[in-house]
Amino acid sequence: MAKEHVGRTKATATKTLYAVMKEISRRGGSMPAKELYPFVEANVSLTDWEKEPAGKNKYIRWTNSFQFYSINYAKAGLIVKKNGMWYLTPEGEAALKLSPEEVMEKGEVAYREWRKLNPREDKHDEEPTDDNVERDRAEELNMLESDAREGIRKFIVSKSPYEFQDMVAALLRAMGYHTPFIAPKGKDGGIDITAYLDPLGAQTPRIKVQVKHKPETAIGASDIRALLGVLRAGDIALFVTSGTFSPDAKTTGTSSREFIRLIDGDEFIDMWLEFYDKMTDDDKNMLPLKRIAFLGNNE
């Protein structure tokens, strides 16, 4: 490929990946893969050349460069691609203090180091081309995972607060806990679920669970403090939301003397997927899944 072409391709990836990293940061650290392309197209200035179909598969040029160089960013530990989501790591957050060009260089250096240590595993070409079949397959799989995850999220959103509460209890049971108390409709005294290690609740710690079904809301620090306020000796706290936690809420949780675990909507889906096979049929039916296997690779 001509140097001019490579230079333009790299410049395209530099600006699009940096813009996406900033958006993921603004959103609190994660973003569905299926939303990446629409975001770039709506918020990044793209030239006619960048928007032009190219190669035998006629993929849009900027999407090719974006996916090609994103591998470097993943090797550098700036982003993580998992289950149809992109996550910004602490290293990626820190990298946003650099210029877009410096972040690109950081990614390329990390990839070169990884290649030295893993010469047989590498399937990433030295230079981007308009035809990269292996990368396109990975991209399509990532988008399928994103679509599947979005379907799960919409299913959860459609549930009532008490149905979501029951799902949280089902997850705890799949993890080996006993759930003798699940709050009925009405006031719950600040506790929605009590979970024990044994059937009698004689062993500690005993888990006091607060559940909030607010998929479009960030839970604030006051809610975290309220849950901590009802803990007694031998208790630990678990706060589960179908939405997210505000930065202040996370800080309150990590700085508390009492142990509290925060699980947001994305992590709840991850945990449901992880423990699904250990659930009873009745519990599975609260959020039924169908497993589909795809031919993959180690990338």
Image (cartoon, helix red, strand yellow):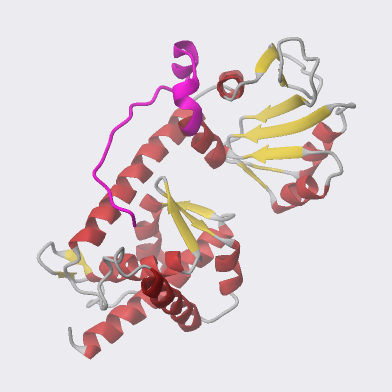
Which residue occupies 22% across, 78% down? 49
Q: Residue furthest left?
A: 56
Q: Is residue 236 magenta?
A: no
Image location of residue 157, percent across then percent down: 50, 31
Q: Position of residue 224 (x, y in %)?
A: 78, 39
Q: Is residue 276 left or right of residue 147?
A: right
Range of the magenta residues? 274-299
Task: Please name the residue shown 72% across and 26% down the image.
Answer: 209
Viewer-nearest residue: 299 or 193: 299
The quarter of the rendered structure image containing the C terminus is bottom left
The answer to which quarter of the image holds residue 217 is top right
Is 298 drawn above or below residue 83 in the view shown?
A: below
Magenta stretch contains residue 278: yes
Secondary structure, magenta segment, majority class: loop
Q: Quadrant of residue 150?
A: top left
- Quadrant assignment for the N terminus: bottom left
Q: Position of residue 253 (x, y in %)?
A: 77, 45
- Which residue does the image show at 34% across and 77% down from the upper left? 12
Q: Could you say where residue 274 lies in the image, as x and y percent from the top left?
A: 48, 33
Comparing 281 with 34, the one in front is: 281
When the figure is inspected, residue 101 is found, relative to residue 273, above or below; the finding is below
Q: Is residue 135 above or below residue 245?
A: below
